[in-house]
Image (cartoon, grey):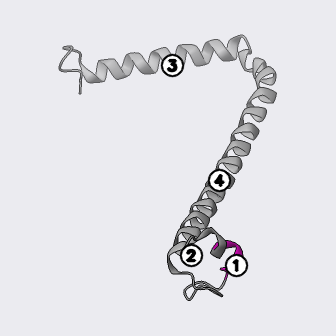
Amino acid sequence: MLSCRDYYIDYMTFRLWIGLWSSFFCLLIVAFDISAIVRYFTRFTEEAFAALIGIIFIVEALKKLYSKLKEAIFFQASCKTYCSVQRCPRHTRCTRASIQITSP
């Protein structure tokens, strides 16, 4: 990790210049009322966050769907192994449709 010592810079002087530079930009923004431009970006920002929330809900729904699909595939595989003629001794959801998949 690089530090001020690697570049032979005094840390406190560096912090001073960062503060002065930030103050200059803050005064520039206030002097020319540049913050009024924000009104053009608020709608875009609102829609971006709404899209992010929508994507999060979609991803969570897909995760649940995937886990249910994985569970169903495991259930079918276990029914192929453990099913009797009428019902699976381990699962109460097992029906004749899953038994027909078994070949023996």
Compared with residue 28, is residue 61 higher up or lower down, i.e. above or below?
below
**Which residue type does callout 4 highlight?**
Glu
The local crowd at label 1, few if under 14, some if 14 to 19, many if 20 or more residues have their Cα within 10 Å, is few
Per the image, the residue denoted by label 1 is: 96
Question: Where does the C terminus fall, quadrant-wise?
Answer: bottom right
- Please give left or right for residue 9 compared with residue 62 in the image: left
Per the image, the residue denoted by label 4 is: 60
Please tell me which of labels 1 and 3 falls first in the chain: 3
Please tell me which of labels 1 and 4 falls first in the chain: 4
Give the foreground label among 1 and 4.
1
Is-magenta flag for residue 57?
A: no
**Which residue type does callout 1 highlight?**
Arg
Q: Are marks 4 and 3 in contact (CB under 8 Å)?
A: no
Per the image, the residue denoted by label 2 is: 79
**Which residue type does callout 2 highlight?**
Cys
Percent across and percent down for residue 55 are 69, 42
Magenta segment range? 93-98
